[in-house]
Amino acid sequence: MEEQKILIGWGHRDITPELPVMLRGQFHVRVAHEVLDPITVTALAIESQDQSSQLVMVSLDIVCVSDIIRDEARREISEKIDGLNPDNVFFNATHTHASAVVTVSEEKPSITWPDVEGYDREKASRFIVARMVEAVQEAWAGRKLGAISFGVGAAVVGSNRRVSYSDGTVKMLGDTSVREFANIEGDCDSNVNLLFTYDPSHELTGMIVNIPVPSQVNAMISKVSADFWHETRCEIKKRYGDNIYILPQCSAAGDQCPHPLVNPAAPRRMLELKYQTDIETAWRKEIANRIVNAIDETFPIVSKDIRDKAILKHENIKLRLPTWNLTEEHLRLAKKEMLASQEKLDQLEENLLDVDYSSTYARVRYYKNIIERFERQSENNDFSTEINITRLAEIAFATNQFELLLDFGQRIKARSRALQTFLVQLTGTGTYLAPQRSCGSGYGASPMDGEIGPEGGNALVEQTVEQINAMFSENFNPFGARF
């Protein structure tokens, strides 16, 4: 592979839905009648000058990019855009909990409800797909000679949200003030991976901002919102110009949240004093400032190393991962809980807008899905998924569809031959994927919460590392020995 001049194009669309809109991200139904801030889709197209390699990265302010939405967008891309292989386009979600409920995969019906009056899920899905394709069209049509730089900054924007107790149990977002609190289960990641794009005169045109935390400061809100990415975009544009494109990516963050869980009162007081507003808005502003301060520190340094040429290679790879089988005990528990939830549901007045009714309805569906999985798991012992692996200069991008717990992400980064590795999660229908040490307790770490477990996660790590490293020679090490 040889370095070549590269073509770069950007696209952007507003995907703020019509109101009222059902919001996705909790077990109970939420309906938004108000937009707090816009949600968007942004696309970045990169192609080698000889057209031998191409890639389009697309980011959306939604919970996850379901396989159905992804495949429909690729189908339309194949029909409407000449010269672009739809398999070279990947879509990632920022994982805001304040965006529309759209069509989800038939394989994951566990937390879906009927549409409330006034909301048309199919119409919302068609709207989002159309805007996704338009953003890609704009980026692809706007390809021009450009340049890149890249680097890594640091910002504390997330904390591990799995709380361990002295009795061996773990609870997601558990209480740390009780006597039984033992420790936070895992690590956090302060890396801010950054890619900057330029025009031929080396004027900044846009940036990828890759951080290991979902956009969920306002995870329970009943308004449409991009969460802290809205404040982050506003702050970047304030400092770098209104015409700058921003493409957010969420790295491995299945066990991360944007709130500190140990002694949260102290930072809460500081933020309320600093911003003189409610705590959720203060946290969003603070995260935005931390991210953009990291950009400010990184940008002047990497602008000394702008690349007009780069190696570009992209592969879309289909994987088969071993499934995480349910046991007879899981089946017994699911039947027991479904029966109890159904009995409770039968006693409630049918009203999807009632929190108790809709959350109970979701629990019935959740346990029904587990029972159905148990009945069919002997027929199929592997799980189909895709990863996208890209080399751009000395860096790599690697995608996965999961809410990947940080352990797996750290293992990929540690073993990657690339100088810098951008992990991008939630590029398909998302489910939690937990390592062995997390399994046994707590939401997201049981075969009842996802079809892929530690064995599948290990296979994902191995195949991702293998594919990344195949794009770099064995002795590729541009800056000498590691620490």
Image: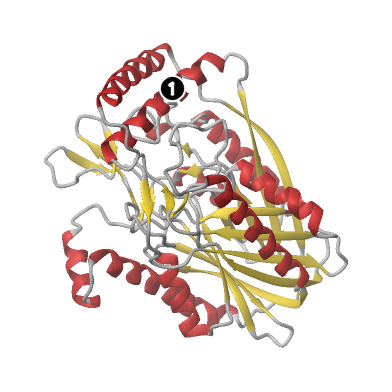
Most foreground residue, 461 or 117 = 117
Question: What quarter of the picture does the N terminus occupy?
Answer: bottom right
Would you identify the image quadrant in which residue 274 lies? Answer: bottom left
At mark 1, the secondary structure is helix
Q: Considering only vertical position in the picture, is 55 above or below 175? A: below
- The residue under label 1 is 368
Q: Residue at x 34, y 58 (%)?
A: 217
Q: Considering only vertical position in the picture, is 86 above or below 181? A: below
Where residue 236 sits in the image (x, y, percent)?
48, 78
Relative to residue 445, is residue 7 drawn left or right?
right
Q: Considering only vertical position in the picture, is 415 above or below 304? A: above
User: Amino acid type of disc 1?
Assistant: Lys
Where residue 154 sits in the image (x, y, percent)?
43, 67
The residue sitting at the right extreme is 50
Where residue 82 sits in the image (x, y, percent)?
84, 60
Q: Would residue 418 be visible to someone looking at this image?
A: no
